[in-house]
Amino acid sequence: GTVVHNGIPLPADATDIRHQRPPDARRRFLMLTRLTVEKGVETVLDAMGRLPHDLPVEVSIAGKGALEDRVRAAAAADPRIRYLGFLDGPAKADALARAGHLLLPSLWYENAPVTIVEAAAYGLGLVGSDIGGIPEFVEPGRTGFLFPPGDAGALATIMARLATDPGALPGLADASAALAQRFSLERMIDAYETHYLALAGTSGARRVAA
C-alpha cells in the first residue's frame, strides 16, 4: 500500500524565525510530549544529570502526564530544567521559536509526530531515538542526531556537542525547511491526489479490459 503522512499547515512566520534564531538558541532544548514512561522523559532527566553543571544548557519540558511530579522535582533541583506545563497555540509557538533543538527520546515505536514537522518548520534541530518512524525525519549531521532509545549517556553527548559546537549542524535552516516542506499539508494533499488518480487510472484500465 501507499503511505501518505499526515501533513500540517506550516506557520506563516516560521521562515523569519528559522533565519533569525540567535546563536545561543543552540543551548536550548525543548520536549513537547505526554509525560509518560514510553515517551522517554526520564532519559532526558538522566542525561541532564550527566552533563557538567557549568555547561550552559536549558531543557524546557512541556506536557502533562503521570511523570509530571518527577519533572517538577527535577526542575526545582536543577535551574537548567524548566517545566512549562501543557502548551498549545501561541504558547507552543513561542516555545518552538525560543528553542534550538527538539528532543524526541521515545522508548516505544512512534509514527510521524506532527511536532517534528512543526519543529522543522521553525528550524529546530531534531534529537531523537533511533526507533519507529523517527529516523525517517532525522538525517544525522543535517537535520539532527539519533541515539539508541533509553541511552542517556549518548543523549548527553549529543546535547553537549550541540550546545558548544556552532558547526554541529551546518545548513540546518535549509535542511529543516526542506524536511518541513516534505511533510506540509500541501504536500499531503498532492500525495492523496496523485494516489487517487493512480487508483482511478488502474480501475479505469480494469473496466476497459473487462
Image (cartoon, rainbow, N blue to C red):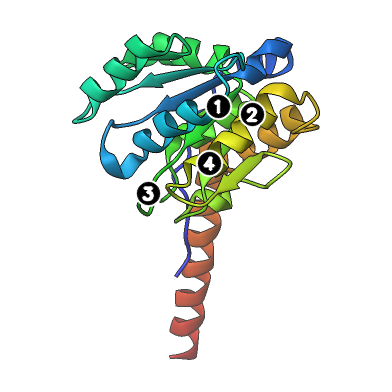
| x then y, percent, for residue 162 | 67, 28
Vertical placement of residue 180 versus 1, above or below: above
Report the amino acid beneath label 3.
Leu
- Looking at the rendered image, the disc whose residue lies closer to the viewer, 1 or 2, is 1
Name the kind of residue labelled 2 in the image.
Ala
Q: Earlier in the sequence, mark 4 or mark 3?
A: 3
Q: State which tag comes first along the sequence, 4 or 1.
A: 1
Residue at the (47%, 53%) spot, across then down? 133
CA separation in Å, label 1 and label 2: 7 Å
93 relative to 136 in the view: left or right: left
Can you identify the residue that label 2 sits on?
160
* Quarter occupied by the C terminus: bottom left
- Say whether residue 8 is visible: no
**Residue 39 shows up from this direction:** yes
User: Residue at left 56%, top 57%?
Assistant: 194
Instruction: Give the camera-side residue of 62 and 80.
Output: 80
Q: Mark on residue 51? A: 1
* Marked residue nearer the N-terminal end (1 or 3): 1
Say which element carries label 4. Answer: helix
Number of the front mark, 2 or 3: 2
Mark 4 lies on residue: 153
User: Would you name the residue on which mark 3 appears?
Assistant: 107
Q: Earlier in the sequence, mark 1 or mark 2?
A: 1
Real-space Cα separation, disc 2 to disc 4, in angstroms: 11 Å
Q: Earlier in the sequence, mark 2 or mark 3?
A: 3
Q: Are marks 1 and 3 in contact (CB under 8 Å)?
A: no
Type of amino acid at the residue the image marks with label 1:
Leu
Say which label, 2 or 4, has the lower sequence index: 4
Whether pointer 1 and pointer 2 mark residues with C-beta atoms closer than 8 Å, the reply is yes
Percent x, y for residue 158? 62, 36
Looking at the rendered structure, the secondary structure element under dot 2 is helix
